[in-house]
Image: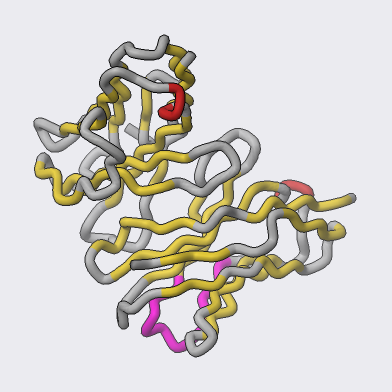
Amino acid sequence: GAGVSQSPRYKVTKRGQDVALRCDPISGHVSLYWYRQALGQGPEFLTYFNYEAQQDKSGLPNDRFSAERPEGSISTLTIQRTEQRDSAMYRCASSSRDEGTEAFFGQGTRLTVV
Amino acid sequence: AQKITQTQPGMFVQEKEAVTLDCTYDTSDQSYGLFWYKQPSSGEMIFLIYQGSYDEQNATEGRYSLNFQKARKSANLVISASQLGDSAMYFCAMSGRDNFNKFYFGSGTKLNVKP
């Protein structure tokens, strides 16, 4: 695609429900990143993939959060048993490792847990 | 660990004037990257400019320049000839030698350009 695409753009869920957030990176980009941005703050790193391999998940806050990228393209970030503190903007970015100087961000998914 | 500090929560600038947004960083890495991103009210993250820690010249991209002072660990963004469309949130970020695009972001500066 032309850019990084994330869906849904907005998600409202009840506390305790599971949610799955999708990221479709720029075609051919091998690296994919997930960030979380609280209101009024800068994005915080969650996890990173090279192709289908999850290289770094040091930013995932707890074991309710997981991510996968099974075919090295589309990625899904899953939050189980959501809590109100999970409410935030979840951003995905992709980069071409060959270029290495710029990561392109998607529009994000605004998650609200009620 | 990397840390980015942006001490200006909000800034005002008159249209057509220049403005400097401050950013300081802390890292033990010898090799790192410094970035600035713009986030308008629409919410997207727009890459503006990049400076590598070994680059001796300050980076420039059109009206944007990065005032890199390595000894002081500062990477201020200078926007020349401000335009109304520059009103946005601006984030400074850095990456370390372990991963070029694993960013550590500052808390941002909200810039308002007055007509």
Going by the image, does A108 lie left or right of B67? left
Q: Is residue B54 magenta?
A: yes
Q: Looking at the image, which residue is at 77% across and 68% down? A: B18
Q: Looking at the image, which residue is at 24% across and 28% down? A: A64
Residue B33 at what x, y percent from top left?
Answer: 38, 70
Quadrant housing residue B23: bottom right
Residue A66 at what x, y percent from top left?
Answer: 21, 32
Residue B67 at what x, y percent from top left?
Answer: 59, 78
| Colour theme | secondary structure
Residue A81 at what x, y percent from top left?
Answer: 29, 18
Q: Is residue B74 magenta?
A: no
Q: Nearer the viewer, residue A103 or A43?
A: A43
Q: Main secondary structure of the magenta part?
A: loop
Q: Is residue A106 above or below residue B70?
A: above
Quadrant housing residue A1: top left
Q: Nearer the viewer, residue B99 or A31?
A: B99
Going by the image, does A35 lie left or right of A98? right
Q: Is residue B33 above or below residue B83?
A: below
Q: Looking at the image, which residue is at 55% across and 78% down? A: B74
Q: Is residue B48 visible?
A: no
Going by the image, does B86 lie left or right of A89? right
Quadrant housing residue B2: bottom left
Q: Is residue A85 visible?
A: yes
Q: Which residues are magenta?
A: B51-61
